[in-house]
Amino acid sequence: MPAFVTPVPLRWTDQDAYRHVNHARIVTLIEEARVALAFTAAGAEGLGGFASGLLVVGLHVDYLRQLRWRPEPLRVSITVRELRAASFTLDYRLHDGPDAAAPVAVTAWTRMALYDLEGQRVRRLTDGERDFLKRHLEPVS
């Protein structure tokens, strides 16, 4: 599976009173990984459309194990599924450490819609955006 992989640092303020990463902060860590994919990586290829109108229209998170704060980043892998005309779903795996051997602590998905902010309506993926996302598409089983 051709996942997009990015390190996501933990902040001291991500932990709760029990010294675990707070469940709500996990959503922010997922967002940071998504920004690395859709804004940074896509932007480096000249694809600025994601940064100009990308909305989360669905979110699901499964907490498999608790994460403790530490200075090393999490390893987050993202794959794409349900690639449609104007939306797609991203699947996330947050590893409890910086490498692939670290156990998966959180799985999640977000359903994303492209949005024309000026026109105030959903818009279709461009061919370039579709090609970019296809590189990370999960094989259908």
Image (cartoon, rainbow, N blue to C red):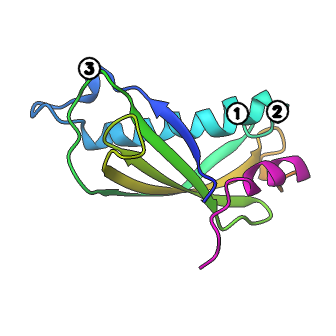
Q: Report, in whole angstroms, how far the alpha carbon at label 2 lies from the one at label 3.
A: 33 Å
Query: Is any atom of residue 81 visible in this view?
Result: yes
Query: Is any atom of residue 123 visible in this view?
Result: no
Q: Report, in whole angstroms, how far the alpha carbon at label 2 lies from the one at label 1.
A: 7 Å
Q: Which residue is mark 1?
A: 41
Instruction: In the displayed orientation, state which residue is furthest to the front.
Output: 101
- Residue at (82, 36) in percent of width and height: 47
Task: Residue 12: give x, y in percent of width and height.
Answer: 26, 20
Task: Residue 75: give x, y in percent of width and height.
Answer: 43, 38
- Residue at (51, 47) in percent of width and height: 77
Q: Going by the image, does 91 lie left or right of 112? A: left
Instruction: In the displayed orientation, state which residue is furthest to the bottom.
Output: 141
Q: Residues within 10 Å of mark 1 (few under 14, many from 20)?
A: some
Q: Which residue is mark 3?
A: 12
Q: Report, in whole angstroms, how far the alpha carbon at label 3 lies from the one at label 1.
A: 26 Å
Q: Which mark is residue 45?
A: 2
Q: Amino acid at mark 2?
A: Glu
Q: Are marks 2 and 1 in contact (CB under 8 Å)?
A: yes
Between 139 and 16, the residue placed more toward the observer is 139
SS type, badge 3: helix
SS type, badge 1: helix
Task: Residue 38: give x, y in percent of width and height.
Answer: 67, 39
SS type, badge 2: loop
Discs 2/3, front: 2
Task: Residue 126: give x, y in percent of width and height.
Answer: 88, 51
